[in-house]
Image (tube, coloured by chain):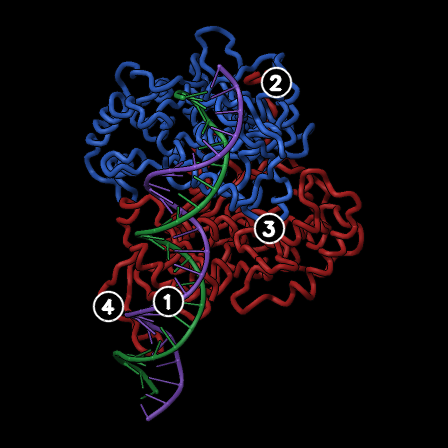
Chain colours: A blue, B red, C green, D purple
Amino acid sequence: MTQTSHPLAIEIGLTAAIVAVSGVASDLPEPMILVARPASATSAAALPSGPFDPVAHRTLEIGLRAWVSEQTGVPLGYVEQLYTFGDRGRHAMADDRDPHVVSVGYLALTRTGEIAQEAPDAVFRPWYAFFPWEDWRAGRPDMLDRLMLPGLQAWASQETAAPQGRPSRTERLRLMFGADNGRFDEDNVLERYELIYEAGLVEEAHRDGRGAGPAPTPLGQSMLHDHRRILATAMGRLRAKMKYRPVIFELMPETFTLTALQRTVEAISGRRLHKQNFRRLIESAAVVEATGDMSHATGGRPAALFRFRRDVLQERPAPGLRVGARA
Amino acid sequence: MTQTSHPLAIEIGLTAAIVAVSGVASDLPEPMILVARPASATSAAALPSGPFDPVAHRTLEIGLRAWVSEQTGVPLGYVEQLYTFGDRGRHAMADDRDPHVVSVGYLALTRTGEIAQEAPDAVFRPWYAFFPWEDWRAGRPDMLDRLMLPGLQAWASQETAAPQGRPSRTERLRLMFGADNGRFDEDNVLERYELIYEAGLVEEAHRDGRGAGPAPTPLGQSMLHDHRRILATAMGRLRAKMKYRPVIFELMPETFTLTALQRTVEAISGRRLHKQNFRRLIESAAVVEATGDMSHATGGRPAALFRFRRDVLQERPAPGLRVGARA
DNA sequence: TCAAAAGTGTTATCCTTACACCCATGT
DNA sequence: ACATGGGTGTAAGGATAACACTTTTGA
C-alpha cells in the first residue's frame, strides 16, 4: 500500500512564472512575465522551464533557483510553489508527441531594475498580452462583450443535461465573468482561463484537440503546452496573496511614492483603486515608513518617498493589503 | 531552455490525507485521518500513498482517486491538491535508502458513515493523535508549556546571528505559538510543525539525522517519511479553506443540527466558537435550509434539522464560514 | 497663474463582537 | 419541576466605502 515494486519513471519539469513590474514610477505600470525567447518567429511563447535533477538539488525550489539564475541571469527574490500539473493532452506538440511530463509550476517575483540586460534567452513581456481580458484598469474591456461572452454563451447553451452537483456552464459563466449581475472577482484568473479553454475559445484548446471547428479568434497570445494555464495560476495567486501578505514590495524599488505603490497594486490586480482609502489602508497596516526624501519627478506637487518596513514581518502575521473598494 | 535532452526519471508518489469526522452528532466530534494499517506493531503510521502511472491515468487526481477507491474502498468526495514535496532527506528509511521520490500531497474529504467497514489495509485514527498541540477545544493544551516551549526556546536561543531578511527563530516562535503576546492562528499548522521539526523535537527530525542527541520526548505520534508534514499541510489547508468555501458539508451527514455543525467546525479548527455568532453567521451565509424535521436525540429541547443548500454554490462565489470570535 | 498631482477630514453603513435571557422537551 | 440543551434580541465598537476639498510644486 505504501510503495510498490516497479517504479514508474517520469520526468519532472519545473516551470516558473517570473514576474516583475516595469514603469513602477510611471502612470501605468505594466506587470511583466519572463518568457523564453522563441527559437523561431512562428513558435509559441514559453515560460522558462527546466528539468528537476534530484541528485544535484536537495529540494525542488533549490533546483528551480539554480537553473533560473544560471540560464536567465534573473535574480529571484520571493518564490512560491503553485501547483503540479500532470494532465496528459496538455502537452500536445506539433509532432504529436505527448511526453510523460509532470510540471511543477512556480511563481517568482523580481525587480525589473535588477535584471541583467544580457539575460541570454529570455525576455520580459506584459502579462496582459496573454490575458487582455484581465486588465480592467481602463474599465471593462470591450473584448469581453465583443469576442468572449458570445462564444461562451453559445458553449453554455450547448449543455443539455446539467451536471449533478457541479455548477452548470451557465452558472460558472455568471460567477466568473459576472455575466448578468456584475461581480468580477479579479482573483479567479485560472477559473476564467479554464472556462474559455473548455469552451474551445483559445488556441491551446484547438491545438490539444478540443473544439472541432477552425482555429478560433485568438483571445490573447497563446503559449506553449499548458504554460498559459500556469501563468493564469500565478496571476490569480499573486492577486490573492497580495491581500494578506506584503509580497507587493518584492516588486517595488527600495523607495517609492504612495501613488507608485497604488499604481503597482492596480497593475497586478487589474483594477483601479480608491486613492484615499488606499492610503488609509497603507497607514493602518503600517507597512511603510517615510524616508524623509521627496520625489520631484511627478509633474505636480512633490511626493513623499517611502520604504517597506521589513520589521512588520516580525510584528504581525498577516500584513497584507486588503484592497477592497473600487475607484 | 525549454526541455533538455536526457530526461531525469523520478518516481512520483501520490499521498493522500483522507479526512472524515467521527461522532458528528456527539458533543465532541473527532477529525479522523486514514492511515495505512502498519505492517508490524513497531512500524510507523503512514498515509495511504501510491505511485502515479501516467499511462493509466490522464491526470494526477484521476490516478489518486483510482488507487484510493481500489485499495481502501473509501469513496472520496472533495479532493484538493496540497503541495509537491521533493526534499531529499525527508524520505530517510530504516535501511538508509533515500529513494528519489517526489510526493504530491492531496487533501480528500469523506464521511465516516459511508466507509465500508472492510477497508482492507487502512484505518481511521484521530488526527490530534499526531498533533495534540493543535487541539485547543478544552483550552490551551498544557503540553505546550510543559514539553514544547522549553525545547523551542532553547533552540531559539542557540541562534547566534539573526538571519538577514528572514525572521529570527525567536520571532517565528512568537508568531506561530503566540509565546508572549498570545495570538495563536489555528491555520498555521504546517509552520508550527516545521518549527518543531527544525528544532529537532519530533521523532522524524531525529530519524532524518537532525538534532544530534537522544531521541526526544515524543511530541505526538510520528509518521513514516514526511507524512506528518503532509498531514500538517492538510490540516492547515482545511482550516483555512473552511472559512471561504463550504467544504465542511463534505464531512457532515445529509441532515444535521446547528450544534452538530458547530461542533464539527470546532473539531476541525481546534477551538471553541461563540454559539450565537456562529448561528448568525450560518444564517447570513444562507448555506443551510431547515428540513422541517426535528432531532430528539439531544437530551434537551429537540433541535431543528438542516441540510446544506447545494445551490449556494451557484449563487455566491465564496460562501464559507468566516469563523471569527472565540467562545 | 494655472495645470497636475499630492495629500487630508468627515460621515454613513455594515459587519463583528459581546452581552443575557427565554423556550421546549425528556426524565 | 428541573435539568438540558435549543434558540433569539439588541447594543457597542470598529472597519469599510463614499463623499469633496486644500496644498504644493513646475512650467
User: Chain ID for label 2?
Assistant: A
Q: Secondary structure at mark 3?
A: helix
- Tell me which amino acid carries mark 1: Gln
Camera-side mark, 4 or 1? 1
- Residue B102, position in %: x, y? 59, 36
Q: What amino acid type is highlighted by mark number 3?
A: Arg
- The amino acid type of the residue labelled 4 equals Asp
Question: What whole-number distance in Å separates the C-alpha atoms at marks 4 and 1?
Answer: 21 Å
> What residue appears at the point 53 percent right and 30 percent down from the top-left corner?
A303
> Tag 2: residue type?
Thr
Q: Secondary structure at mark 4?
A: strand
Residue B126 image position (x, y, % from top left): 52, 61
Estimate how packed mark 4 is, as few (under 14), some (14 to 19) or many (20 or more) residues with alpha carbons within 10 Å.
Answer: few
Q: Which mark is residue B228?
A: 3
In percent of width and height, residue B201 lies at: 71, 55
The reply to whether the C-beta atoms of the residues labelled 2 and 4 are less than 8 Å apart is no
Q: Nearer the viewer, residue B307 or A17?
A: A17
- Mark 3, residues whose alpha carbon is within 10 Å: few (<14), some, or many (≥20)? many
